[in-house]
Amino acid sequence: MEVVQLANSSSHLFTPSEVFAWSTRVHERLAEDDTVGAVVTMGTATLEEAAYLFDLVLRDEKPVVFTGAMRSHDQIGADGPRNLLAAVRTATTPGARGLGVLVVLNGEIHSARDVSKADSDAVDAFVSRYGSLGRIYWTRSGDEVVIRRAGTRREHIATETLEPRVAYVKTVLGADSSGLHAAIDAGARGIVIEGFAGGEITPGMVEGVVRALRVGISVVVAGRAPNGRPNDVWTEPGGGGWLRDLGVLSAGELSGPKARIKLMLALGIGDDGMVRDHFG
């Protein structure tokens, strides 16, 4: 094993540009013949977004596994050492090749695309909407990594840069367009709107969406519900069908934060067609 320190700070301080740069360094190490796989350790606050960014830009078949800890080393039941061991076991398992970037905590193996942090404190905080891909069993004869299934369809965005100017606007009851106008005035190149469960927005946000599209900003809507996706049924202003007819793109089953990461990478290519290719 070889340890390479990419950063030494809390994960809530990281930026997408930094994470993108680190993915390049990991790719370089994976290209070495004697490298079997890679484990990335980091704080759990932004782990799901960082892991998904890696998943979109890396094409390596060798396993890349993210892990962290929900309890610090001085707490009873600290889970860091065990999570690290499980991640290393997974990264060196032949069955983990070609599955995309993985997230391993609490003995469970998740796809970076589907996993999310669902609890602020519990050791089983990370869950996947379709269930885990496998798990690590602790036995007397040694640790056993069991891969039950492959993950959902993996995407790749081939870009050498990332566009950080993507705003995130949340929809709440009675919201107006002030957040959208602020993003436009600040020079955003893309906006991800977290709509209601079905991807709807309020009538008060319609003006801001229209303005954003008029000035050439890519707008993507995601649903706030942990399951499902934005619909295209309702055609009144703010409804899913209305948004789609207007030119707003859908995040599909991606969460809002992950849709933002994806839009940053797609905009990094600088091609509007590429953005539309990666969003519904």
Image: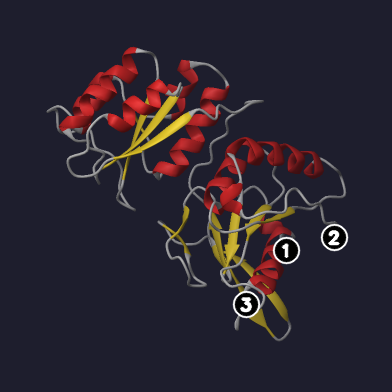
Identify the image quadrant of the C terminus.
Answer: top left
Which label belongs to residue 248? Answer: none
Query: Residue under circle 2?
Result: 1
> Do the CB atoms of the residues marked 3 and 2 lie less than 8 Å apart?
no
| Contact flag, marks 1 and 3 (Cβ < 8 Å) | no
Q: Quadrant of residue 229?
A: top left
Q: Residue at x 46, y 16 (%)?
A: 272
Q: Nearer the viewer, mark 1 or mark 3?
A: 3
Alpha carbon distance from label 3 to label 2? 23 Å
Task: Sort mark 3 into few (<14), some (14-19) or many (20+) by Cα contacts within 10 Å.
Answer: some
Residue matched to label 1: 88
Specify few, some or many for label 2: CA neighbours under 10 Å numbering under 14, 14-19, or 20 or more.
Answer: few
Residue 58 in sight from this viewpoint:
no
Q: Seen in the image, is 198 located left or right of residue 69?
A: left
Residue wearing tag 3:
78
Q: Amino acid at mark 1?
A: Val
Instruction: Judge the density around disc 1: few (<14), some (14-19), many (≥20) Cα neighbours within 10 Å.
Output: many
Q: Give the Cα distance between marks 2 and 1.
A: 9 Å
Q: Residue at x 56, y 51 (%)?
A: 12
Which one is nearer the viewer's eye here, 238 or 109?
A: 238
Amino acid found under the numbered disc labelled 3: Ala
Q: Position of residue 29 (x, y in %)?
A: 81, 44
238 relative to 112, above or below: above
SS type, badge 3: loop
